[in-house]
Image (spheres, rainbow, N blue to C red):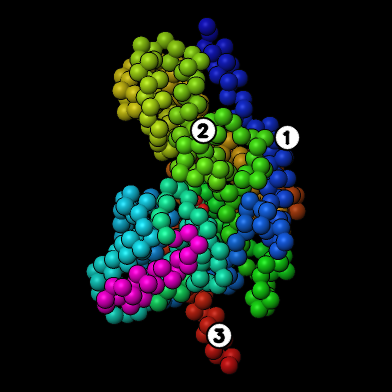
Amino acid sequence: MSESSEIARLREFLTELIPSEDQFQRLYQNFCTQIRKGLGAKTNKDASTKCYLTYVQDFPNGNETGNYLALDLGGSNFRVLLVTLKGDHEADQVSKIYQLTERELLGTGPHLFDYIAKCLHEFVCELKLENENLPLGFTFSFPCVQTGLSKATLVRWTKGFNCSDTVGKDVGAMLKAAISRRVGLKIDMVAILNDTTGTQMSCAHRNPGCNIGLIVGTGCNACYTEKVENCERLDAKYKDKPKIIINVEWGAFGEKGGLDHLYTEYDRVVDKNSLNPGAQIYEKMVAGMYLGELVRLIMMRAVKENLVFSQCKLRKHITDILTKRPHCIESKVLSEVANDKGDDWPVVKNVFKQVFNLKDPDPKDCMKFKYICDVVVKRCGNMLGVTLGALVNKVGESFSIIGVDGSVYRCHPNLDGYMRETLDKFVEKDYRYDIMLSEDGSGRGAALVGAVVYRDYMDKTRLK
Ligand code: BGC
């Protein structure tokens, strides 16, 4: 069979992963419906995107100063930071990463929070700050119902976390309790925020036009600035300020069927094998935790149908690995192979060697593997562009900046372009947008939320 007809067969096999214009249109409409429902008081319970109120209503102006502690929990590790805001849009920070093991991810809530308090204690002692009583912002990147800036009830775990005795409880209270169990540790927790909010705030610190925050990392989610009059669930006492950041929690989109028209058998298996079947449907199509798995499942079927490795003597062995080893293709592989220019395929060959112990692959198989990875990432980027387009239109400003963070966005060379492809189609003609990479949104954002809370408090006391 000629090379071009082989590629044509593979392309045909992958068509269900290449959405049509109509399918993107439906995605757009379904997503807008869910956002409307999420914001409405009566409809919120039926919405997949819960549009959580963050209570962040003040935005940085770049003049913020002072020292703040920040905790960042939400990905594969946990960080503690000391952020120094220096005015003039500048900030410095010192941070330390602490590894999380299965004991923390899947153990009890008190164990997790005691571990966090221990790391925090070590960190402040190392910096000789243990007697300072610094304000702390806690970036906790999981769905939470907030009833104020420092009260957040955990709705569910995502991204491979599943600690017992935590869902339905106030995360802030759990952290405070763990801090008070540690003799000698004094911390003033002033705010709990999502990483999307942190990212938006950190970009707004540089450029006040940033009104959308996006994370494409282990998990995926977005937030945006909404007018208070559109937030039916917001108590009247918060309506003297014009705007509030809404944490969309769009990872859950699809739980009410909004993505059925794009769903493939691969998505179904990823969901079935996950810790949270039936939940976080959109996230499982676009986030780093799942992209490698999608490629593994597609490869498994492609090998079975003789579309890849058809002439390879290790075919059976490769099939075995793909079948028996979930997660054998890591998501970072998708970014790496995208950088392989295809003359002699050094990156793809290395992946094949690591994963399948295959030493001398056929260049055609290298090209096909890169193509499969690309189809998965393009679907992800294009879908993200559609839902981001909906948010740009919802914000309704003539110019919106989308602040972005997350390992997948940072590392993949083509994701930004794929997002822009559909953003350009869906953003209405009166609006323009740009995308800005955040500088450590989770850390700096937490400090900034702390700083604007403090500024607001000082303003109010001065008025009295
Ligand atoms: C969480 C979000 C978070 C996102 C990115 C999702 O799994 O539900 O709260 O913003 O991951 O970290």
Foreground disc of the pair 2, 1: 2
Residue at the spot of label 2: 269
Tell me the number on the disc at residue 22.
1
Residue at the spot of label 3: 459
Q: Nearer the viewer, residue 373 or 257?
A: 257
Queried whether the magenta region covers residue 178, the answer comes back as yes
Say whether residue 186 is left or right of residue 294: left
Q: Earlier in the sequence, mark 1 or mark 3?
A: 1
| The image quarter in which residue 234 lies | bottom right
Q: Quadrant of the C terminus?
A: bottom right
| The image quarter in which residue 401 lies | bottom right
Report the span colored magenta: 166-187
301 lies above or below 240: above
313 lies above or below 176: above
Q: Residue furthest bottom?
A: 464
Foreground disc of the pair 3, 2: 2
